[in-house]
Amino acid sequence: MSDRARSACIAVMGVGMAAVAVALLLGPLRDVRAQGQEMPWWVLVPLFAAAELVVVHVQVRRESLSISMAEVPLVLGLAFAAPAELVLASLLGSLVGLLHRRQLGLKLLLNLGLFALEAALAATVYHALAGGADPVSARGAVAALVTVVATDLVSAALLTAVIGVRVGELDGEVLREAVTTGLAAALATASVGLLVVLLVRTEPLGLLPLVVVLAVLALASRAVTSLSRGNARLELLHRFARAVEAESGVDPVSAAAMREARDALGADRALLVTAGPDGAEAGRLVLDDDGTVRRAEPGPAAWWAPALAGRDVVADGGRDDGVDGLAAPLRAEGRVVGALVLEGRPHHLGAWSDDDRGLMRSLAGHAAVRLHNAHLLDAVRAEADAAEHLALHDPLTGLANRRGALRAVGARLAERPCAAVLMVDVEGFTDVNDALGHDTGDALLREVARRLVAAVGRADHVARLGNDELAVLLPGATSTEHALLLAREVLERVPGPFRREHMTLDVRVCAGLAVAVEAGVDAPTLLQRADTALYAAKRERTGLRVWDAVDAVGSSRRLALLGDLRRSIAADELAVHYQPKVDPCTGRATGVEALVRWHHPEHGRVGPDEFIPLAEQSGLIAPLTTLVLRTALRDCARWRRCRPDLTVAVNVSARSLLDPGLPEQVAEALAEAGLPAGALVLEITETAVMTDLDRALQVLHALRRLGAHLSVDDFGTGQSSLAYLTRLPVDEMKIDRSFVAAMAASAPDAAVVRTAVDLGHVLGLSVVAEGVEDAGTLEALADLGCDAVQGYHLGRPMPAAELASWLARQVPAPRRGEPAAAP
């Protein structure tokens, strides 16, 4: 049924009720006269008007108990007025109240018909039951009470029918609630009416104290109701704020705002309208009955349109569409961005009041602030996701890059220690590029990538690591033999003809396979092993090579270095150099990072990237970490005599991070140096944590309880995600030098750095940028709000004595906007 048809049906019901009242007056009530003494009918008019105006509403969320004194003039009219006079007085008095409450149109017609029917029906029932008895007799009193009950039941049934027509279905629960909430109040006020009848008959002067008592009670009730309503609205505002702030994201916040506003103001429906830059409606979010939110396209100009122009809107049902509604604008940053809209209201809650409008404005104001913050957070997340996607994917093939591969392999190793990686190289790729051009070479790479994806069935298990090297994760491998079988099945599907511009090329590949079957192998190690096996396959021309323990050493040099490293650690022959961490705004050093150096007596300087993996693989990492930790804390203790705020950072390897004895080792080193735990920063990598997340978290929390600071190193190259970052008990994150060094020349890398700084600060972390090689990069990081920076532009790693001199020579620059200090 359409809205117009429903309105017509309700109008017919109102006219029908009036017609029944006239029929009763012309039929059973035609010859009925007042019993006993008569009262001028016009005396009842102000009494009916007062009863309609003085109504006490006790509301709890969407339920309301309305208490009026309408039964008092009704009982008086039954006792002292003729039926026609009673109906006339009821209509005139109620009309005054309805007009005062601005109930016009269809509502006015319906209510007048209902009041006429109630009065005529009450007169019919009363005179039939009283049978001419004295109104103050037992029979007259019982007749009056029964009449009130019968009239209220009929009225509740009729109102339920009207509501059913309005909403499209009949609900017996509405009738039950109307009867249970109104019947007790009606009997009470009817009893007051009988008391008034008795006083009129026996002691009219007794009406004066009764009127005073009723007036005082009415005023007190209104005051209590007003105070209770104020407290209730404060509670509603508090509950609304709590519910909205508990959500994150635009849609959840919108759903909470609509749900709480609908329940707080007793509406049937709620929606949130968004405004475009021109102020026109751009879209709608509609709250369904089951609490879900759906999006709807903008419709024709609606009644709430003025709210998008910044004005409150009230629809009181007097419009052609018969809508009851309330709308308030949503303002953010000085402009209207939408509107919060409520529609429909149960009849027993009455019309929208000024208090309702004030509460709606408060709710809309709070919702607008929270939605604006949610929009900003979603924008930051979207930018972070986009930057993360750029950082983790290869633009040529669309597959993961090396960072993405590290993430995928690390996630696999976090689930279970067994995993296999197949490293694939396209043979003759350089010749294709040189002879046929890079376009053909790129097309060849895309075709090989497509074949690999088809072979494993999942694009997220294939990555391009650089140039013509691709990696394939074989997660189903359960052993080296099984992994070798899977690898051969994949490689069988890659070779074959590749047609390009009337030319056919023969695609050939070679591969290296590495399998992790024991705990403690992290993603970088597994990829390094696969790369080593691939190098061996290319050197030996075997097509497929499986990494073994011999490859871990690689050569007689590495075997010799391993023995020399063991002796050098035992003899404390390794040196620790320090690179300063500087505040980019002042140039003042806030801390240093300890970096281990090894000068071999025969081979000269051996890089950390060569001997630290040796220490990891051979079990020497624990004594090496102890050596660096004790040396760094001892040197820091000397520097802090003049620079008490200086901190020292020490890197912690994956194996050390899984050692439950690490916190005790750190505590002993701090006690030996006489330093507080806050002077030490322990730098960890995300891939190291993901080797065994649960064990690593236990060690990290123990270090945090000790008081040491924790820093995530090389952020952006491992499992860099909000999920992992928020789980780790860290204080600092370091942006990898590969992004920082390329900021000036690469927009994606600059976006990654900017997003990383913003996310770090949102999470309450200090942000350090590595790889600052020039003044431009330093200035850009200062503008982004980076907390500290490192790099050759500020200071290279240096021995402890040289660093002490460097610190003594420091003259920090003034912060921006401050005058320079005299040296």
Image: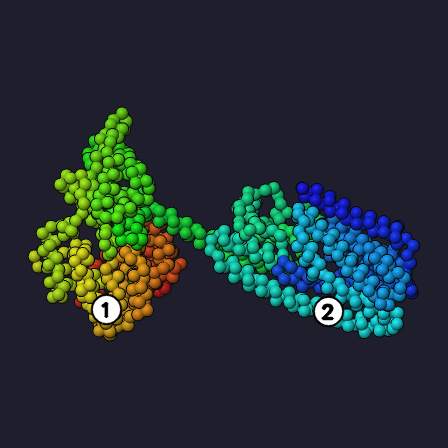
- Nearest the viewer among 274 and 124 is 124
Return the x and y of residue 652 as percentages of the image width and height.
24, 61
391 up-or-down from 654: above or below? above
- Position of residue 65 relative to residue 315, above or below, is below
Of all residues shown, which one is farthest toward the left?
602
The location of residue 154, given as percent across then percent down, is: 76, 54
The residue under the point 17% across, 43% down is 545
Position of the N terminus, as image quadrant, is top right
Quick one: label 1, few (<14), some, or many (20+) residues within 10 Å?
Answer: some
- Colour scheme: rainbow
Q: Is residue 311 above or below residue 818?
A: above
Q: Which residue is mark 1?
A: 665
Residue tagged by mark 2? 219
> Which residue type does callout 2 highlight?
Leu
Q: Nearer the viewer, residue 687 or 594?
A: 687
- Give the secondary structure at mark 1: helix
Task: Determine which of the numbered discs, if any, sits on residue 704 in the image.
Answer: none
Image point 80% across, 53% down: which residue? 117
Q: Could you classify mark 2 by the number of other residues whose Cα lies within 10 Å: few (under 14), some (14-19), or many (20 or more)?
A: few
* Residue 473 at x, y percent in the picture: 28, 45
